[in-house]
Amino acid sequence: MGLRDYYCNTILPELRKELGEKRSVMSMPKLVKITLNMGVGQAKDDKKLLEHAVRDMSEISARKPIVTLTKASEAGFKIREGWPIGCKVTLRRERMYDFLENYISIVCPKMRDFKGYSVKSFDKQGNFNIGVKEQIVFSEIRYDKIDKIRGLDIAISISAKNAYEAYLLLSKMHMPFRDKLTNKEAV
């Protein structure tokens, strides 16, 4: 049973009991999208670094990433408007659930010195942001093929009224949290 089926058959009824049975199923918190972003600041000097980042991102997500460009010139960083600076992928529907299931069950246990995520990573709307320091924790990446260790950002967008509802959803999906979030703290 995949994570999407687990959400529909197990998590959704539990959320309805905890958050109030009078609320409709459509108003319950659910995953909207997962965005993976990899910034490659050194790409301004060496275009090969961006090609390697795009390759790594496509292996992690099983999707072709888009190259992100700078929006404005910044003299301090010696970059001009329109230069390629990173890549990103947005996952929705079944791929989103597959990625999250893989991340929770395989990637999190492989991270060194990992004690769980802080509940402070939620924003007021209930979105959850994660920073991964090394792309090699993903089993899709072959260690002998990488040129450089680079990190990536994972933004999990959730349709929740507040951070507490999003916390409930992710904790029921077995996301490893360091501490608990109460409804009073989330407001």
Image (cartoon, grey):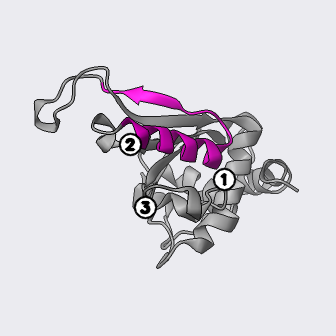
Say which of marks 2 and 1 sits in front: 2
Asked if the stretch drawn in magenta spans residue 59, the answer is yes
Residue 70 image position (x, y, % from top left): 31, 26
Residue sitting at 68 percent across and 50 percent down? 99
Badge 2 vs badge 1, beta-carbon distance below 8 Å: no
* Residue 185 visible in the shown view: no
In the image, 175 versus 135, the foreground residue is: 135
The magenta span reads 47-70
Which corner quadrant holds the N terminus? bottom right
Asked if the stretch drawn in magenta spans residue 63, the answer is yes
Pointer 1 residue: 100
SS class, disc 3: loop
Task: Bin the neighbour count of mark 1 within 10 Å (Cα to Cα): few under 14, some 14-19, many 20 and up.
Answer: some
The dot on residue 133 is: 3
At label 1, which amino acid type do we have?
Leu
Decide if residue 5 is on the left or right side of residue 141: right
Q: Quadrant of residue 105?
A: bottom right
The earlier-in-sequence mark between 1 and 3 is: 1
Residue sitting at 64 percent across and 54 percent down? 169
The earlier-in-sequence mark between 2 and 1 is: 2
Pointer 2 residue: 39
SS class, disc 2: strand
Q: Which residue, as the protein is rendered here, is positioned at the far left?
A: 76
Q: Is residue 126 above or below residue 113?
A: above
Decide if residue 69 is on the left or right side of residue 140: left
SS class, disc 1: helix
At label 2, which amino acid type do we have?
Gly
The dot on residue 85 is: none
